Image (cartoon, rainbow, N blue to C red):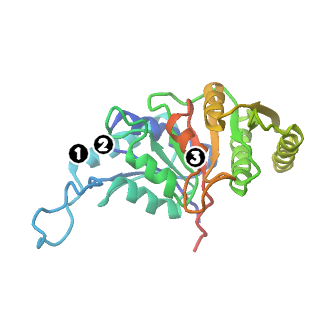
Amino acid sequence: MNRPVVVGVDGSPPSLVAAEHAAQAAVWRSRPLHLVHGYLHPLGYGVPINPYEVGLPAPTEDGRKMLEQTSAELVDRWPGLTVEVRQVAGGPGATLVEESRRAELVVVGSRGLGGFAGLLLGSVGTQVAAHGHCPVLVVRPPDRPLPTEGPVLIGVDGSESAELAVGYGAEEAFRRGGTLVLAHVADERHADDGEAAALLATAAASARGSHPGLTVEERLITAAKPDQALIEATSDAALVVAGSRGRGGFAGLLLGSVSQALVQHARCPVLVAHPHEPEL
């Protein structure tokens, strides 16, 4: 299965920036790009008022034009990129979660149409980041151009989710020809340098083993709040990779607290390291 890179597009500036990130990701992975527009409002906009009416609204002409224009601009910028566009009758969040079952990567902007100015991440991005069935790239800040410099950063805590993040992060750093920075945040009140060093060394050995020649930096940070320390560390990063759940997370949480904080506040794009849905 040639899984595509999927991006949700609604015509808003953040979603168009997300489409650029998705196009670059598709080129790096030699995958097709799918531009998807879920044209029903998550709260039911567009659903027939009369409950006895059967069927869903048809795709809109405005939506078609927006998708085709976006596709043309991306192909012009990345010649050879294969782009497919389609409108789907469904709320954008639910649509992208369903699309993620068959995707290599899903990309979302950090705020789309209908978002409130005070929200740091719109409901669509939050929903997909938490429920995706493949890795999810949240493009933040919403107006940041494609990053050209900076390392790929990963928070390492010894969890299974962080191990998956190291694997994804090593791939990303290798594709970009950049540096992989493995960071472990130790509580400054109960820091165990030996345990932290072992965690970092194990993660670094895994990254170097999977991608020989990759430059890997190990960084021990002491701080009272791991989430805030990692957010600060994203200031000079091109990408931060977050596990979908950390070592201290509750089983019922789809995103751990540190991952949630990064998705909401990181100063660079965030890749949430969900495992791929098994291919059928």
Left or right of 214, for residue 55: left
Q: Residue 91, position in %: x, y?
A: 32, 56
Q: Is residue 33 visible?
A: no
Residue highlighted by disc 1: 62
**Image quadrant where one finds the N terminus:** bottom right
On the image, numbered disc 2 is attached to which residue?
Answer: 66
**Which amino acid is tagged 2?**
Met
> From where the camera sits, is residue 7 visible?
yes
Residue at the (54%, 30%) spot, across then down: 146
Rendered location of residue 99, percent (x, y)? 46, 60
Circle 1: is it few (<14), some (14-19), or many (20+) Cα within 10 Å? few
The structure residue drawn at horizontal position 49% and vertical position 58%, both measured from the top left corner, is 131
For the residues marked 1 and 2, what is the alpha-carbon distance in whole angstroms?
6 Å
Label 3 CA crowd tier, 10 Å (few <14, some 14–19, many 20+): some
Could you tell me if the residues under marks 1 and 2 are in contact, i.e. CB atoms within 8 Å? Answer: yes
Up the image or down, 100 lies above or below 155; here it is below
Choose between 77 and 174: the one closer to the eye: 174
Q: CA distance from mark 3 to mark 2?
A: 36 Å
Which picture quadrant has residue 200?
A: top right
Which residue does the numbered mark 3 point to in the structure image?
257
Whole-percent x, y for residue 173 in the image? 72, 39
The answer to whether 49 is drawn above or below residue 163 in the figure is below
Say whether residue 249 is left or right of residue 42. Answer: right
| Kind of element beneath mark 3 | helix
Q: Earlier in the sequence, mark 3 or mark 2?
A: 2
108 relative to 9 in the view: left or right: right
Q: Nearer the viewer, residue 173 or 31?
A: 173
Q: Secondary structure at mark 2?
A: helix
| Most distant residue in the front direction | 189
Q: Nearer the viewer, mark 3 or mark 2?
A: 3
Q: Is residue 98 above or below residue 125?
A: below
How far apart are labels 1 and 3 at the CA level? 39 Å
